[in-house]
Image (tube, grey):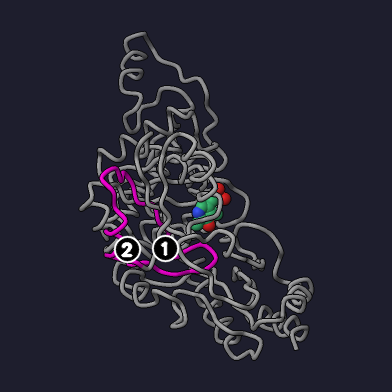
Amino acid sequence: MKTSDANLTNALIHLGRDHQSRGRSVNLPIYQASTMLFNNLEEFEQARDTRYEKGTLYYGRYGTPATFELENMMTELEHGVGCVAVSSGLTACVVSLMAFAKAGSHVLVADTVYGPTRAFCDNVLTGYGVEITYFDPMLGADLALLVQANTAAVFFEAPGSGSFEVPDIPAIAHVASAAGAVSILDGTWATPLLCQPLTLGVDVVVHSGSKYISGHSDAMLGLIVAGSQVHYDKVRKMSLSIGDRAGANDVFLALRGLRTLAVRLRQHAQSTVACIAWLEQQPSVDRILHPSHSDCPGHEHWHRDFSGSAGLFSVVFKPGLENKVRHMINNLSLFGIGLSWGGFESLILPVDPSPYRTATTWSATGPTVRFNIGLEDVDSLLSDLDAGFAYLS
Ligand SMILES: *Cc1c(COP(=O)(O)O)cnc(C)c1O
């Protein structure tokens, strides 16, 4: 990892814990609140008039001291000016898009974004008169060719969901800013530890806090961090206008999860290197799609812009192995079958990006499987894979 590693590791331990109402406990309490009380009408009116501003305690939906601690912590980690915590990662994508797109505007969306983000664009945004163009995330500076006079936002993801291409983040951010459009990056895979998109020119970064940030598969949360006051104000106002809020327990779990993010990610990365080294020796494997691997499109961008690896990647198997791959998955014992990722446990799931691609073609001819490498003993994971892969021969 790069030199900022020590600072980030320490920041994870010490940020977000200095609120007075913590009392003598190490952690903030779970802040359950709807009504907040004021000493007099003047105090109430003051809060009402500043309710869209960062840190104003007004009503539970606008945030509690714990929400603000989490938001401030994410702001510092991402080098932003403000963060808005919302109820899920998908909500973070939705709120950030709604903050900048309006009827008559045009939004450029990477072909590789998280499926439900794409479904929101197709099923909701277009219905409100927003025009969507999907683009090949590997276009880089050539994305300028797709810009229109009414382009309001560019939404992309690094790396792409399921397929893990790593776009040229600064080049895309530059196209957006030259067009007067807002660039929004879904940075869930990297967390604020492995990449800080705002420092690469991106305007707004979104995260699913349900993944590595909370890290234990027991929270639903989204985080939106803006790099400028103007963008922060728009995002916060949109989230409050929609009436969305991050739940008190989920905020608590994210604050707690962040404390161990660096040490968890280090282990995820180390075990992932071992699993990939094993997987690439297997005759049934055609390609490994992990940004750290030379097979992965955009590997050079990962090398330039990211300081490390996460434990989520895909494997493309040789054609014709569909049924055998199903047997392999069903017969693993340490890899669970289920959605999401970024928790402490290993997961496996077939993925098929082809129905969700319109600007690019998914070229894999064999079945593709996504792996989430968890925190189990790595030799046990390798033995489990070895036993499962017996079904492939
Ligand atoms: C999981 C995920 C989301 C959605 O997050 P939820 O918290 O599950 O709503 C958004 N983007 C990416 C890249 C994801 O992996």
Q: Nearer the viewer, residue 27 or 151?
A: 151
Is the residue 337 above or below the residue 67 in the image?
Answer: below
Please name the residue that numbered disc 1 is placed on: 158
Secondary structure state at the residue bearing disc 1: loop
Residue closest to the far left: 178
Residue at image location 39% in from the left, 43% down from the top = 71
Query: Which amino acid, by three-letter code, is at mark 2?
Result: Ile
Left or right position of 291 against 184: right
Q: How many marks?
A: 2
| Residue 203 part of the magenta segment | no
Q: Quadrant of residue 305?
A: bottom left
Is the residue 291 above or below the residue 69 in the image?
Answer: below
Marking on residue 169: 2
Quarter of the N terminus within the rendering:
bottom left
- Do the residues bearing badges 2 and 1 touch, measured as CB atoms within 8 Å? yes
Is the residue 237 above or below the residue 374 in the image?
Answer: above
